[in-house]
Image (tube, rainbow, N blue to C red):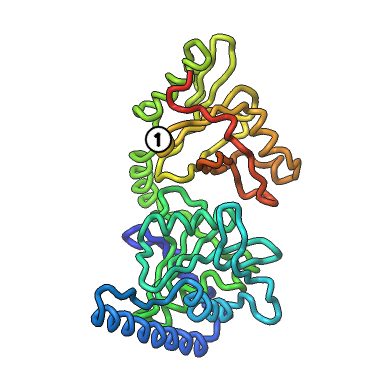
Amino acid sequence: MAYTDHGVMKITDATSQANIDLVALNAEISAIRAYASRHIKVRAKNADRSKGRRERHLNEPQVAMVMVQPILNLMGWGTRDDPDSLWRELALPNGQADFACLVDKEVKVTIECKNLGVNLRDEKVVTQAGCYAFAAGAPFAVLTDGLVWAIYSTFAKGRPLEKLVRKIDLSRCSIDDAMEFFGFWNKARAVAGEIRVSRPPTSARKARGRKAKRRRASLNSPTFSKHVALVELSIGGTLRPVENARNTFETSTGVRVRFCLSSGKKGAAMFNIGREYLNGGMLFLAHEGCEHGWLVPADKLSEYLLGASTAESSARKTWTPRVSWSEEGDVLWTNREAFKTLSLTAHRHPAGHA
C-alpha cells in the first residue's frame, strides 16, 4: 500500500490480483464498454432530434444488472458456491444498498449504483454511498455508474470526498489497473481479512490534519456559542467550563453538560461520543445544519450504547452514532446489531427555547 503525491490511497499489493480470471475480466470490461457506448450514442442522437424529448439513458437497475453484477461475480461475490455473499437491495435504517458483499453474514462492502454519466464527484452522491456503508457497518463503500468505479473508506476521518481509496474508469483503463482495483476488494481478500487501508505517511497526515482543523466545529463559532447561551437559559443559570475536560461545562448544582458538535452538510450528523461521556449529566448534540439541538440525559445514551452487554460493547471506548432529523421526528442510530434506534424527538432543544 502506498500514497500518491495527491494523498489518494493507492494499492500496490501484488497479491490483490489473485483469484480473478484475467481473460474473463478483460472480456467483461470490453462488453461493458460496448454496451455503454451504444447507449451514449442513442442518448446523443435523441437529444439532437428533439430538444424537448427526454433522453434515453441507463437507469440504476439496468446499470446494476448489466454492468455491475457480472464484475462482482468475477470477483467471487454471489457465485453458485456462496450465493449469500452478495445481496441486492439490502434494507438499512436510512434506505437500501444496491449491493452488499458479505463474509459470514458481516457486510464488508456496499455498492451504490447510479445512472450512467452521473457526476460521481458530487458530494451528495458520495455522502449517500458512505451513509449506506456506515449503516451496514461496512468498512468500504463503492460508488459506480457502471463505467467509473470509486471506493471510499467508510470510517476514515475527513469529508466524504477525502475518503477516496481508489478510482478507475473502465472506458480507458488498462487491464492491469482493473485487476489491481477489483483485486483489492475481491472475496478472497475479504475472507482472509486483507481488505484494509494503511495509515498515510506523516507528511500526508499533517496535510490532512491542517484541512480538518480548519473545518472542525468549534464552540467559539457563532453557530455553537448560541447553543451554550440557550442551554444556560434552559437551566436558569450560567455554565462554568470544567478544567481539563474538552467542551464540558458544569451547572451551579454540579451537573455536567458535555457539548458534542458536528459540522458539514444538512440531513444527518455524526458525533464522537467517548465512554466517559456516559458517566452521568447531560449531553448536548448540535449540528451546524440543524436549527435545533438535542439535550439528552447521559443515562439514555448509555442504555442505548451499552444496553447490549456484549463483549464488544464492554470493550469499546468510543462510538460514532448518527442523528437524522425530519418533520416526522429525530433519530439517533449506529451500526449496532439489528440497527436499533433511539428517538431524540422528545429531547429537541429548539432555537429560542428557554
| Placement of 273 over or under 20, stated as above or below | above
| Placement of 146 over or under 260, stated as above or below | below
- Residue located 35% across and 50% down the image: 203
Q: Secondary structure at mark 1?
A: loop
Q: Quadrant of residue 136?
A: bottom right
Q: Nearer the viewer, residue 202 or 266?
A: 266
| Placement of 120 over or under 318, stated as above or below | below
Q: Residue 225: give x, y in percent of width and height.
A: 39, 24
Instruction: Determine whether, in the image, residue 105 is placed left or right of residue 73.
Output: right
Q: Residue 147: give x, y in percent of width and height.
A: 40, 76
- Residue located 59% across and 35% down the image: 344
- Residue located 42% across and 19% down the image: 229
Q: Nearer the viewer, residue 347 or 33?
A: 347
Mark 1 surroundings: few (<14), some (14-19) or many (≥20) residues within 10 A: some
User: Label 1, on which residue?
Assistant: 217
Q: Nearer the viewer, residue 62 or 137?
A: 62
Q: Quadrant of residue 331?
A: top right
Q: Residue 247: give x, y in percent of width and height.
A: 48, 26
- Residue located 34% across and 80% down the image: 172
